[in-house]
Image (tube, rainbow, N blue to C red):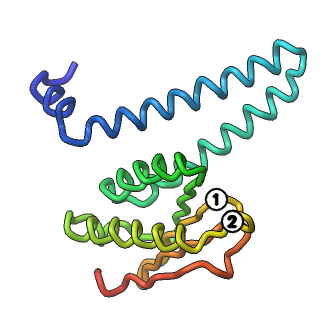
Amino acid sequence: MGDKSQVLALGFAPGAPEWLKVWRHMRHEFINNIQVICGYIQIGQAEKGSEYANTVAAKIQAAGQIMALGVEQVIATLVLQSLELAKAGVDLQIMVASDWDGLPWAGEAKARYLAEVVLNLIEAQMGERDPAVVEPVLYINFEGDAWPRLTAYWAGDRAHGMTLLLSGQQ
């Protein structure tokens, strides 16, 4: 067991209530998925249950892509933003290219700058969304090492996306 004072400090940290919301959301999704799988099994459609389980596993694997950013503050910001967007029916998908290097963004000031740029990019894309035309999946791509850039676009509408070059902040 960890140091009690450290556990208490984390439990009473200013952002703790937001992380509880994330935990509740994840728990709710997990329980729903288990109930669907069990339902398929109970009605004798184990193959459909297996297909559903594989689909859920693939979604969880894709959601883990965010960890490749390598900048904890930005990851935390995007996890919280993803929860807010989900309330509006928008699925935020973070894609991290193999050439992305999070190391130059590791300091607090640069991490904050990157997080603010990404949130502004998301906000701009939300303003461009036409719900009648565009599927509610917003992709944010992090790519490039020498010339890092962010690209945001809606599923099925990459032509109207936005790309930002981040080289000035390294």
Q: Earlier in the sequence, mark 2 or mark 1?
A: 1
Residue located at (64% from left, 45% from top): 59
Say which quarter of the image contains residue 128.
bottom right
> Which quarter of the rendering shows the C terminus?
bottom left
Residue located at (80% from left, 26% from top): 49
Residue located at (80% from left, 29% from top): 50
Residue 167: x percent and y percent? 36, 85
Q: Is the residue 135 above or below the residue 57 in the image?
A: below
> Which quarter of the rendering shows the N terminus?
top left
- Work out which residue is located at the far left of the displayed protein and give it: 5
Q: Residues within 10 Å of mark 1 (few under 14, many from 20)?
A: some
> Could you tell whether 46 is left or right of 80 in the image?
right
Residue located at (9% from left, 26% from top): 5
> Could you tell whether 67 is left or right of 47 in the image?
left
Q: Which mark is residue 53?
A: none
Q: Residues within 10 Å of mark 2 (few under 14, many from 20)?
A: some
> Could you tell whether 15 is left or right of 38 in the image?
left
As shown in the figure, which amino acid type bears the numbered disc 1? Answer: Val
Q: How far apart in space, not on screen, are marks 2 and 1 (Cα)?
A: 5 Å
As shown in the figure, which amino acid type bears the numbered disc 2? Answer: Ala
Disc 2 + disc 1, Cβ < 8 Å? yes
Say which quarter of the image contains residue 70.
bottom left
Residue 39: x percent and y percent? 78, 18
Q: Secondary structure at mark 2?
A: loop
Q: Is the residue 6 above or below the residue 73 in the image?
A: above
Q: Which mark is residue 137?
A: 1
Say which quarter of the image contains residue 54.
top right
Q: Secondary structure at mark 1?
A: strand
Residue 20: x percent and y percent? 36, 32
Q: Is the residue 157 above or below the residue 30 in the image?
A: below
- Work out which residue is located at the far top of the displayed protein and give it: 42
* Residue on which the image places disc 2: 155
